Amino acid sequence: MINPLRLTSYVLSVLMVSWMDQPSVRVQPPQLKGSRPVEKQTEIAVIRDYLQSWKTLQAAFDQNQSALLDAYFVGTAREKLANTIKEQESLGIHTRYLERTHDLQIVFYSPEGLSIQMIDTVEYDQQVLDHDKVLATKSMRQRYLVVLTPSDVRWRVRILQAQLD
Amino acid sequence: MRFRNAALLAGFALTQFTFSRAQDAAMKLPKTIVAGDAFSIQTTGSGKAVLYIVGLGQALRRDVQIGESASFPTGVLYNAGHYLAILVGPSSQSTGEFDVIAGARPETLGFLAKPSRLPVGLHNGISGAVYVFDAYRNLMTTPTSVSFELSVPAGAVQSRSVTTRNGLAWTEMDSSTKEGTAKFVARVGDASSTRIIEEVPGEPCRIMISAHPNGNKLEVQTAPVRDCSGNAIPDGTVVTFTQSFNNTQTTVDVPLKEGVARVDMPANKGSRISVACGVVAGNEIRWNGGQ
């Protein structure tokens, strides 16, 4: 017999955990400076896929599994991130990126629809671990330039580069 | 004697404590480093430590002697981004952050151009976006001038100069009036990238037919079919001939061959023959037996 009180408490705690895992996301109106306007559906899809790319990035860097990047990263971004994961693995370290906020703005949508550029100011905690020992944890606030290109089923990140503010 | 030993022990313990304190690792980090450049990190304290440099772009580890500077030669840290430096000493650790920025010299271009084939005379029909990278495939975000050039053999050259914003420059260009293989070139300094674009004739501008009797047949033929810029419409394009006679209508589809379409139709006196290709209708002939 399931105790309804315990079940409710379990559901609430799951909801709390999943709510706490979600970063807060702020999307500013696109600032396109003359390039093609972004349809609402495209904007929603791009942001959804980009935020999901961070989830796969987190898992890939925490588990040192570069194959996890494949679904959401392509080209230069995928190559560079995969190489870093390889380096982490050889050094015996792994990194946890815990995103807290995203402040997003689309700044370019190419006329032919082949690329979208976004600026994302991300607040996150970076925790570096040597096996299970925490070496350091640092809170970061960083501006990223992101370029996404469409693939068969989703937008994938082609460039992800931190910028000086 | 006991007292002396105790004092020595106490002194040794004190020395150890002082030494341990002296092992507190600290470092002085540069604020920014140009991708691929040599750099060094000055450490203070004493003893041995491990220095980690970790970011999304790279992960490095160095065994260092605290109190000395850890040197990184050219080409070791080359991916632009934000990095966390961690100096792990025997009894303490120190952390810091710094940025690696893209180099100043453009080396490669990511050139996205579309379409690869289009009709002539289309306003803003061709678009190109260029991302400018340094030698390590870092996006160069300092404003840089990109020149775009679209040319067809024996045709006028269109050129534009656009300054990058966030590492990107883009433009739109008209397809030329002459059919042919166009070269779309983006150039920044010594770096360039070329895309080939096929410019094909547009829709026919007008179609003219003429008819000549041949026994009980009429030989109906178009004049060479061209677009409004004078380019020949490609062979294989279908032309539709329609003959109306006594409330009946006969339609024949004929592909262009060497720029013209020909068909034999019954030489019915009083019949009307018309022609069309795509959305363009041509002239109409009323056959009165050659009168």
Image (cartoon, coloured by chain):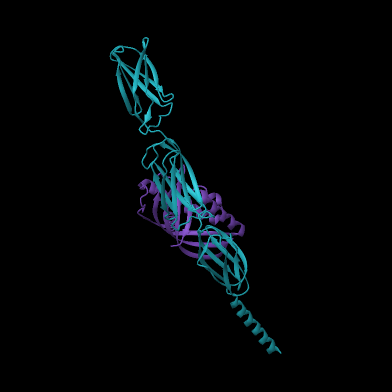
**Left or right of A145 on screen, residue B268:** left
Pick the front one: B123 or A98? B123
Seen from the viewer's position, the closer of residues B239 and A50 is: B239
Q: Answer yes or no: is residue B79 visible.
A: yes
Q: Quadrant of residue B247?
A: top left
Q: Residue at x 37, y 46 (%)?
A: A41
Q: Is residue A133 above or below residue B135?
A: below
Above or below — where is A14 with respect to A110?
below
Q: Residue furthest right?
A: B1
Q: How many marks?
A: 0
Q: Colour of chain B?
A: cyan
User: x, y (%) of residue A147?
Assistant: 45, 51
Side of B80 relative to B4 (left or right): left
The quadrant of the rendering that contains the C terminus of chain B is top left
Drawing shade for chain A: purple
What quarter of the picture does the N terminus of chain B occupy? bottom right
- Residue B158 in the image: state x and y as whole percent: 41, 44
Instruction: Between residue B255 and residue A14, name the one nearer to us.
Output: B255
Is residue A19 visible to us here? no
Which is nearer the eye, B199 or A121?
B199
Q: Position of residue A34 (x, y in %)?
A: 35, 50
Q: Is residue A81 left or right of residue B7?
A: left
